[in-house]
Image (spheres, helix red, strand yellow):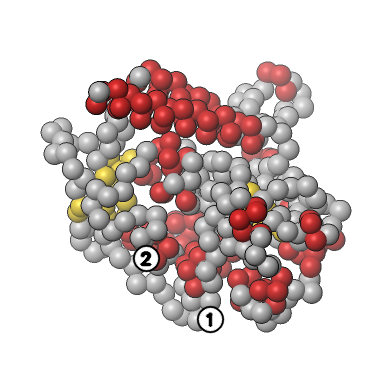
């Protein structure tokens, strides 16, 4: 019985690894050669008539430790999990803590952030699984 | 069962090796070396050519190209192909600990956690030092890792799916192709069983 349980767990782990491998292969088949860790955010951008946002982790990690955004500013680790919108940014939350025209460009420079290819979904590029960990509905619902 | 696991990992390694599949070597692409790997000249493309930025967008042209920033930084063979921890340790980058205060620095915790792994790979050494130079405790504890010995079960499959270490490693922090950066301590001949917690002397 215990052996059977163990086999079951091993089988599950093997299956998951295979699924991950397949996802990885599928995610990499073709076009995007984005930088590792580039996050595309398109929870509400395109629905509101804007290009998706591209967030380059590499550019920001040169300047700030992870803690500044993921602890002090309360940005979740999951892509699409924070529910960021322009109102919050203008009020100085999330991106708006720096993107205020003082530390970094302000919200009037729309096209510097909203620079993604139309149709690109929310995901962390070159990640082990290229899909949002939080479903769009769950994080985009509250306004 | 071990065979299934082996097959799964083989499939994974295959997928990792085939990462960005792009056409290459104009002379004879069919018989090029490392056919499925990204040729060096096509790595770290500028925003307009990376496939996720819109080249038709005016702002795209104003964004920095990764290679411009990566030039002086130490290299690695995965992820951004930058050794980020090395870059910080050598002072090549000075990421702020406090957005408002460039002088404030992290109070790093020098505590290594050794996790004895079940498979044939070397044991995992988790260094709090490198992690606490970039993060504070609350990012990982207790949501991702409970602060109790033996309370955190993990597997490579779960990590690949984004749990535990996989919250960052495989997304932003160095990817799981760098096996030996974590699996770094040779197994003891007579394993003692439960995970050992060791405190390392300050350097």
Name above or below for residue B76 compared with residue B142.
above
Q: Is residue B102 left or right of residue A139?
A: left
Q: Residue at x 24, y 48 (%)?
A: B150
Q: To which quarter of the image does residue B36 belong?
A: top right
Instruction: Tell me which corner region of the image, top left, top right, bottom left or bottom right, holds residue A26.
Output: top right
Q: Residue at x 53, y 26 (%)?
A: B14
- Label disc, if present, on residue B137 of the rendered structure: 2
Q: Residues within 10 Å of mark 2 (few under 14, many from 20)?
A: few
| Location of residue B157 with respect to A79 vertically, above or below | above
In which quadrant is the C terminus of chain A drawn?
bottom right
In the rendering, which numbered label is found on residue A54? Answer: none
Q: CA distance from mark 2 to mark 1?
A: 20 Å
Residue at position x 77%, y 27% from top?
B26
> Where does label 1 land, which residue?
B100
Where residue B146 appears, x then y in whole percent? 31, 56
Q: A5 and B1: which one is in front? A: A5
Say above or below: A67 vs A6. Answer: below
Residue A58 appears in the rendering: no
Q: Quadrant of the N terminus of chain A?
A: top left
Q: Is residue B32 above or below residue A101?
A: above
Circle 2 — which element?
helix
Number of residues whose C-alpha sits closer than 10 Å to that of mark 1, classed few (under 14), some (14–19) or many (20 or more): few
Q: Position of residue B40 (x, y in %)?
A: 64, 38
Give me the chain letter of mark 2.
B
* Mark found first going from the N terminus, 2 or 1: 1
Please tell me which residue is depicted at 61% across the width and 44% down the height of the picture: A131
Front: mark 2 or 1: 2
The chain carrying label 1 is: B
Counting from the top left corner in percent of width and height, residue A33 is at: 68, 42
């Amino acid at each position: 019985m215990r052996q059977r349980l163990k086999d079951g767990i091993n089988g599950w782990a093997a299956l998951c690894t295979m699924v991950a491998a397949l996802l990885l292969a599928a995610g990499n088949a073709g076009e995007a050669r984005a930088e590792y860790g580039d996050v595309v955010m398109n929870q509400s951008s395109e629905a509101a008539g804007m290009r998706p946002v591209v967030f380059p982790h590499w550019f920001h990690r040169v300047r700030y430790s992870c803690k500044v955004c993921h602890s002090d500013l309360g940005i979740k680790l999951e892509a699409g999990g924070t529910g960021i919108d322009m109102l919050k940014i203008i009020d100085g939350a999330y991106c708006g803590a720096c993107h205020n025209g003082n530390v970094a460009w302000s919200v009037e420079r729309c096209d510097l952030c909203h620079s993604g290819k139309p149709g690109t979904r929310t995901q962390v590029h070159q990640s082990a699984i290229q899909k949002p960990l939080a479903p769009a509905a769950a994080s985009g619902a509250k306004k | 069962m071990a065979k299934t696991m082996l097959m799964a990992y083989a499939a994974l390694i295959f997928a990792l090796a085939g990462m960005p599949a792009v056409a290459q070597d104009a002379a004879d692409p069919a018989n090029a070396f490392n056919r499925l790997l990204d040729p060096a000249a096509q790595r770290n493309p500028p925003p307009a050519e990376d496939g996720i930025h819109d080249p038709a967008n005016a702002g795209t042209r104003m964004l920095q190209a990764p290679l411009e920033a990566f030039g002086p930084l130490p290299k690695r063979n995965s992820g951004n192909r930058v050794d980020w921890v090395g870059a910080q340790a050598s002072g090549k980058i000075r990421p702020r600990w406090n957005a408002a205060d460039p002088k404030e620095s992290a109070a790093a915790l020098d505590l290594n956690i050794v996790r004895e792994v079940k498979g044939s790979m070397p044991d995992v050494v988790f260094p709090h030092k490198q992690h606490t130079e970039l993060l504070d405790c609350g990012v990982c504890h207790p949501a991702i890792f409970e602060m109790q010995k033996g309370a955190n079960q993990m597997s490579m499959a779960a990590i690949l799916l984004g749990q535990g270490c996989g919250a960052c490693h495989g997304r932003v922090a160095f990817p799981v192709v760098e096996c030996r950066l974590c699996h770094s301590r040779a197994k003891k001949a007579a394993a003692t069983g439960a995970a050992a917690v060791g405190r390392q002397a300050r350097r």
